[in-house]
Image (cartoon, grey):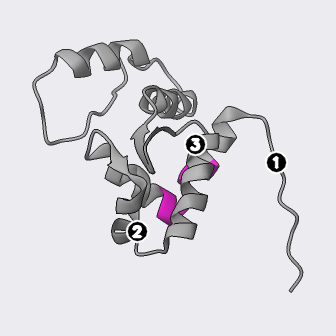
Amino acid sequence: MPRTPRTTTSDPDIRLLSALADPTRLAIVRELAESNETCACDFTAACDVGQPTVSHHLRVLREAGVVTSERRGQWIYYRLAPDVAVRLATIARSMIPGGLIPVSDLVTRRRSAPASTEPAVSAPI
């Protein structure tokens, strides 16, 4: 079966959502959400794929602005980009009609609210 050529886009929202649409990349992001930072070598166990595959997925996430990286000697440590949650919230808000709580309010409330095990949900005002 012939392969369909991949289209590339400069739209950062499409790149972000495309990067998160892959199960392995989503597993990497979830792993990073649970920790401050993770060494690239630790993703092979969490994702059940080999190091070359992990490296490919980390490159896609880095190019989409989902993660940042820092080299320390021979190891590379990854973190979620500081603005990725706000970017996702902005995309989600753009799809819901009506007045929602501004993203800046959600970020402020989340920082000042006590830690909760339940995910933050924005509701119409």
Residue 64 rendering spot, x and y as whole percentages:
62, 41
Return the mark for residue 62.
3
Disc 1: which residue? 8
Q: Secondary structure at mark 1?
A: loop
Q: Residues within 10 Å of mark 1 (few under 14, many from 20)?
A: few
Q: Are marks 1 and 3 in contact (CB under 8 Å)?
A: no
Which structural element holds mark 3?
helix
Residue found farthest to the front: 73
Image quadrant where residue 53 sits = bottom right
Query: Looking at the image, is mark 1 or mark 2 nearer the viewer?
Result: 2
Tell me residue 100's x, y (percent).
42, 20
Q: Disc 3, disc 2: CB below 8 Å?
A: no
| Point 26% across, 44% down: residue | 35
Q: Which residue is mark 2?
A: 44
Q: At 12% from the left edge and 30% from the top edge, which residue is drawn? A: 115
With respect to residue 83, does 49 lie above or below? below
In this view, the residue in front, 50 or 34, is: 50
Taking the image as shown, residue 28 lies to the left or right of residue 60, namely left
**Residue 103 location in percent, x, y?**
42, 19
Label 3 – label 2 distance at C-alpha? 17 Å
Q: CA distance from mark 1 to mark 2?
A: 27 Å
- For badge 2, the amino acid type reads Thr
Region in magenta? 18-25
Identify residue type, mark 3. Answer: Arg
